[in-house]
Amino acid sequence: MSVTKVSSAMQDLTDDYAFSGTVSGAGAPSHRNDIINGGYVTSQENDTAAVDDDYSIGDLFLHVGEAAVTTSLQTSGGPQGGRNFARINIDTANKQSGWVYFLTNADCQDYIANGKMSFGIKIKTTSAAIDTVRIGLLKWTGTADSVTSDVVATWAQDGTNPTLATSWSYENTPADVNLTTSWARHTVEDVTVDSDTNNLACFVWIDDGTIAQNDQLDVSEWQLNPGSTVNAFSSPLRVDVEYQIQYFYETTYNRGTTPGTGSSPQGAWTLTAGQSNNEISGIPFKTRKRVPPTIVVYGYDGTAGKIWGYNGSTNMANHTFVFGWMGQAGQGATYSTGTALTTGYLYSCHYVADARM
């Protein structure tokens, strides 16, 4: 029997974590994990300066906190000897921070039917200063999929849970989780899901009130499934993870490039100007979005709201553009509000389409 060697490019594309675990109640097969990118196999956005209520590393994980933090995607030293993880670096002493992951209303229906949910995550700290975190499994009873993303109304410390924003409440009773400088899995299991739930969220935050500048918290292997016990962590192929993320968020930039970075047109959306001197065709998205997204385009120098022209030999000046007829699958037309376009020239831009909650 011969064995075909997989090319490094194909191996990069299909890097995955094996499905594993045990059945965890009705509707929860052993490989099920409803957190997309829980092992941080990819990060399109790569936003390293996370303010309060700001999506960051991993694309679907929202940072909430009393002050901005520096976040990063780490590709070595993770659990299982090589799994990626996200790191929070504390920029301001004694200010709390945490991560939130949201489930859509459609993804909550199995949890409501099952009546139970269970969660697991691996965490470590790089210093003894951060010695406790807390884990909250939250429900939203406001309008489905119209959540208040900043789930914290008032922060508290050292054993007191934050007061949540209106229409959010704890489904579990969060308690201290003790940390070390080694990876350890922490679980919250057999949590009742109320019938009035419209959305769910997983919230992990630093509980310590005395945190030094440059203290760090590392997280990976987010796992959520219906049922009374949590499954072993699992994640599909990276190509599938990226496709799932693009239901919420996509960009034309290369993986790991922060949107707004000055860039060549490689991978950018490019079209030729048509008959009108101020209109070109719209942008078709890579996959249909959760809702019609907010879209931002970037010129070749990274300037937001711009698109650049090319006459065959020279990058032309940036043009200011607006969009019309936005839908889940794309937007229908792009209009120049500045200098008229030249028929036959190429016009390009990088873009971000954001339909996250």
Image (cartoon, helix red, strand yellow):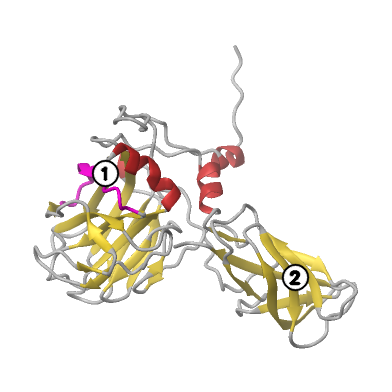
Residue hosting label 1: 120
The residues colored magenta run 179-197
Query: Residue at (27%, 37%) from the top-left corner?
Result: 230
Q: Is residue 81 visible?
A: no
Residue hosting label 2: 333
Alpha carbon separation for disc pair 1 and 2: 44 Å
Task: Give the side of residue 140 with respect to residue 176, left or right.
Answer: right
Quadrant holding the C terminus: bottom left
- The kind of residue on which mark 2 rests is Ala
Query: Residue at (87%, 71%) from the top-left corner?
Result: 274
Helix, strand or loop at mark 1: strand
Judge the density around disc 1: few (<14), some (14-19), many (≥20) Cα neighbours within 10 Å: many
- The kind of residue on which mark 1 rests is Gly
- The answer to which image quadrant residue 13 occupies is top right
Judge the density around disc 2: few (<14), some (14-19), many (≥20) Cα neighbours within 10 Å: some
Q: Can residue 255 be seen in this view?
A: yes
Query: Is the residue 30 above or below the residue 92 in the image?
Result: above
Image x and y of residue 171, in percent: 22, 52
- The answer to which image quadrant residue 325 occupies is bottom right
